[in-house]
Image (cartoon, helix red, strand yellow):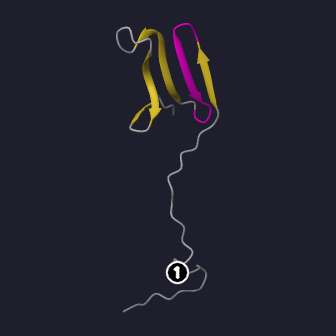
Amino acid sequence: MQTAQSSGDVPAHDGANAQPVTDETKQGNLITIDSDVLALKVDTLGGDVISAKLLKYDAELDSKQPFVLLQDKPGHVYIAQSG
């Protein structure tokens, strides 16, 4: 029977000062690109397109709200991610 012995090279962790791991999403600057038909928002950190709207097309008939292709809102995340 063999027993493992600690050499003291690896520090022990008692958990007293443990901090929770949080899921933080990092975001760079947002660039807005507008044309007469399309409005885009691109995150400079990674190049993700986080918002895309068709400006000449209504979301609903006669609503005057642009048709949303991509958006990043709580409960509805639909974005185009790169790499």
Rendering coords of residue 64 (x, y %): 44, 11
Callout 1: 10 Å neighbours few (<14), some, many (20+)? Answer: few
**Residue 64 on the magenta segment:** no
Quarter of the image with the N terminus in it: bottom left
Q: Which residue is mark 1?
A: 14
Q: In the figure, is residue 14 to the left or right of 69? A: right
Rendering coords of residue 5 (x, y %): 50, 89
Q: In the figure, is residue 41 to the left or right of 1? A: right
Residue at image location 53% in from the left, 30% down from the top: 48
- The image quadrant that residue 30 belongs to is top right
Residue at image location 63% in from the left, 26% down from the top: 31
Rendering coords of residue 2 (x, y %): 40, 90
- In the depicted structure, whether residue 21 falls above or below residue 1: above
Q: Which residues are magenta?
A: 35-46
The three-letter code of the residue at mark 1 reads: Asp
**Residue 36 on the magenta segment:** yes
- In the depicted structure, whether residue 11 falls above or below residue 32: below
